[in-house]
Structure formats: C-alpha cells, structure tokens
Image (spheres, rainbow, N blue to C red):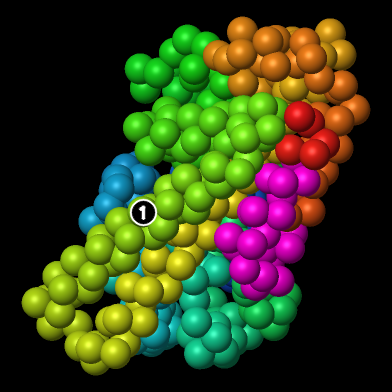
Amino acid sequence: MSAVLDSATEHQARARVALTAALEAGPSHAYLFRGPRGAGKRAAARALAAEILAAAAADPEDVRRRALLDPSPHPDLVWIAPRGAQHLVEEVRERVIRAASYKPFEGGKRVFVVEAAEALRDESQNALLKTLEEPPEFAHLILLSSEPEALLETVASRCQLVEFAPLPAAVLEAELAAAGGGGEEAAAAARLAAGDLERARLLLSEPGRALRAEVERALAAALAAEVAAAPWKALLERAEAAGEEAEAATREALEAEAEAGIKRSAREAAEEAKRAARRRRTEILDLGLELCADWLRDLAAVGSGAEEVAFNRDRLAVLREQAAALDPAAARRGAELVAQTRRSLDLNVSEELALEALFFRLERLLA
C-alpha cells in the first residue's frame, strides 16, 4: 500500500480499498472519482497519478515527489480545470485528447486528470470517447466530478467508478481547527456543510456568515408573522450578488486568457461569464434554502429535547427561545416544505414566486 495514497484517502475507506487494488492489479486506463466537493477527490487523484508515474520510472522517489507538487512540473502529468463555468473545448482537445497519443517524455506512463468533469461540454465529452475506448497502453485518465449526472452515460460507463463519501463532521471540524477556525461556529459550519469541506470554509467566511444571518432573519419573520415584509428577498439578493461576483471573476480570467493568446469571440466570452454567474447564483440560493431546512430541523430537535443533534450549535440560545413556543412537528413539516421548494426550483419555476409562496406557508404553519 502506498503511504501517499493511504494518506490521501485517510477518510475514504471505500476509495482506499478500490485504489489499492488498482495499484496491485495494474491501474485501469480510466477512472471516474465521484463524490461531493471537498471530499478529497483531488488529493486522491494526485496521489494515484504519482504512484502510476512512479511505478514506470527509473527513479520512483523523484517522480513521486514532482508529481505530488501542485502545480506539478512533471511533463507526463497533465491536469486541467475549468477556468470559467466550463472547460474550453480546444484545451480538452489539445492537452488531453491529442496529447494522450504522444509517448511519455519520461518513464513509461502518462496521466491526465480532468477536474470538475461535469463542466465538460457535450462536444468535449463526445470527443473524449475515442480516447476512453481505445487508449494507448501508456495513457491513464482520471475524471473528477461532484455532479456526475451531468456526464454523458457513454463517458461514465467507460470509466472505473471510485466513490467518495461526504466527510464526517468531526473530520471537517478538525480540518477547520487546523486552519485556525475553532469554537462553536466551526462546529456548526462542519455540521451544516454536509460533508463538503469547501462549503464548511465558505460558512466561516464573511459571505457565509452573512448568508446564515439572512436565513435566521427570514425564519424569525415567519415565526413572528411578519412575512409581509418579504424577508426572502434578502436571500435572493445575496445569491444575485454572489452571481455578479462570479461573472466579474470569470470575465477577468477570460481577459487574461485573451492576452495569453487564447482566442474566443465576444459572444462566447459573454456566454461563459453568464453561465458562471447563473451557476454561482443557483449554488448560493440552494445553500440558503438548505440552511433554512437545517434551522427548522434544529428547532424540531431542540423542541423535542434532543439539542445535542442540532447543527447550528453556535445558536442554541436562539433555537431554545424559538422552540419554546413551537410544536416540533410543525418545525419538521416546515423543513419538508423547504425541501419541496428546493426541488421545484430544478423545474425552472420563478425563484421569487417560489420563495414568496414558501414563506407565506411557513408563516401559516409556524406563527
């Protein structure tokens, strides 16, 4: 067992078993690492790539050391990530599809890692099929995805699946503490993150704290029968602001690419930036609704005398006060209403109308 791979999959027993077996039997030509963001897929992919390259090298330790650097200077490790909302089609063609046919610069293997594979356009995925179906014996592809349903079935079916589970809250809390984030707020962020270390870090940032505060205010308005003031609009505005930030960052990245010689029409650049904005806006709005459901479930837990299972551990005093005059069953029903609204947004209903209907229903249920 590789110590590097063992360390990279410390909290992912299933993935560790699968990848250990792969190294012992000889690695597959293609893998799909599937699991939530922040679950350790990147670290595991880098460790696996290092072991594949090291096994075919004259100096395994030197190759392993260079492959583990981020970014890696090893010429036979190609790692691509989307710079905007989607991967560039030409980058996929040049750096993965065409490059996979070239013999290794060193040793006997080449490894290609595609981060956020769900951001591959259908054109890129279809182009990858031939490489996946008839790869050179020295080429290995590792696709990472937190949204595998966005991948074509023909692509996913040609990869060996490696599952990554959400990280336990205790692991997230330890990671946050190691980075300087401790206390009850970090404990709450670790539980609210649903196994996603990146989300836990977001919740400890100023935008994350602001989003939690907006959720608490909106639900307090429902409990106090003050929904007529439209408290849900603050959640929409928070998501809109996050989308605008993502759009601006994407435009800046695209301008830098243009200066570096990567050609793209003004229309393509505008569409790319808009897609990044929509994606981020949707992510933040969905997170806000998930936090609403978590708060309501916490109210039910506290009201039932089980506050030890509450996620919002840093807000127990507020939860106790609100739960004192609330039927736990009503709070649980409220969480179900939020879940229904989250599902309805997948059907492209009006976000503002959906949230307005949700909070008026919550007011009738809870106030």
The image shows residue 19 at horizontal and vertical percentages of 64, 49
> What's the magenta bit mostly, secondary-structure-wise?
helix
Residue 65 visible to the viewer = yes
Residue at (46%, 67%) from the top-left corner?
278
The image shows residue 46 at horizontal and vertical percentages of 44, 50
Residue 30: name its quadrant. Answer: bottom right
Q: In this view, does 166 lie above or below 100?
A: above
Q: Which of 68 and 236 is in front in this view?
A: 236
The residue type indicated by label 1 comes to Ala
Viewport quadrant of the N terminus: top right
Instruction: Give yes or no for residue 293 being in the magenta stretch.
Output: no
Residue 11 visible to the viewer = no
Q: Is mark 1 on a helix, strand or loop?
A: helix
> Which residues are drawn in magenta?
343-362
Q: Name the residue under label 1.
A: 241
Residue at (49%, 71%) from the top-left corner?
119
Residue 182: name its quadrant. Answer: top left
Residue at (36%, 54%) from the top-left corner?
241
